[in-house]
Image (tube, helix red, strand yellow):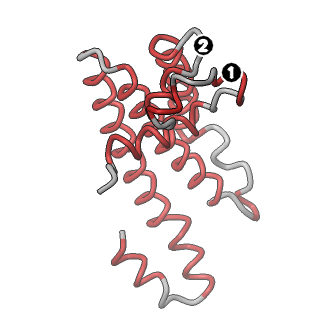
Amino acid sequence: MYESQARRDTLDENARRLFDDTLFLHGRLQQSGAAGAAAFCESFRAFASGDMAKAFTLAEKSRSCYEEGVAALSEAEHDKWTGYYRGDCLTDIRLTEFCLTALVSYLRVLGDGPDFHTWERQFLIPATESSIMLLSCKQRALTNGDLAGRAYQRYYQPSV
């Protein structure tokens, strides 16, 4: 992808638009789809081993990959092609993202419910503070995306 991006930058405006709407679009779709599928498989592995927080985090990562695919399709719609990908051209990217959104919510209910603050305490609040105050008195529960993003950092980018 990076090499093709460098070549793209050498093209004139019309050729760049054609490149973006064909080769680069399909590269983005392949990349985001493969990353989404891999994250989903890892999410299922975590779920099967009983690690609900990790399953939730990876399911959200998968969902965001498919969201990137939807964005790529939308960006290729312009001029006479406006609305061309509204049916996803047999890719079902929007349906996949929709299903993953439901899965992420379901995993959160299973693992973090019923109060929806357990994982915030686990991933975001220092241990010295977590037992002192009820989070529900202090703030609203995080959205799935915000919580998963912060948990992902904890799982995959530990502080040094």
* Residue lying at 39% horizontally and 40% vertically, measured from the top left: 36
Relative image position of residue 83 (x, y in whole percent): 72, 48
Instruction: Give the Cα distance between marks 1 and 2.
Output: 8 Å
Q: Is residue 110 above or below residue 84?
A: above
Residue 136's disc is: 1
Kindly state the secondary structure of the residue where label 1 is placed: helix
Look at the image and tell me whether residue 25 can be seen.
yes
Location of the N terminus by quadrant is: bottom left
Relative image position of residue 17 (x, y in whole percent): 60, 75
User: Tag 2 or tag 1, which sits nearer the N-term?
Assistant: 2
Query: Label 2: few (<14), some or many (≥20) within 10 Å?
Result: few
**How many labels, in total?**
2
From the viewer's side, name the closer residue of 90 and 46: 46
Q: Is residue 60 left or right of residue 146?
A: left
Amino acid at pointer 1: Ser
Q: Are marks 1 and 2 in contact (CB under 8 Å)?
A: yes
Q: Is residue 5 above or below residue 115?
A: below
Q: Is residue 143 left or right of residue 153?
A: right
* Residue lying at 32% horizontally and 46% vertically, measured from the top left: 156
Q: Is residue 158 above or below residue 63?
A: below
Residue 115's disc is: 2
* Residue lying at 46% horizontally and 45% vertically, measured from the top left: 65
From the viewer's side, name the closer residue of 18 and 28: 28
Relative image position of residue 116 (x, y in whole percent): 58, 18
Amino acid at pointer 2: Asp
Residue 141 location, quadrant: top right
Kindly state the secondary structure of the residue where label 2 is placed: loop
Query: Label 1: few (<14), some or many (≥20) within 10 Å?
Result: few
Location of the C terminus by quadrant is: bottom left
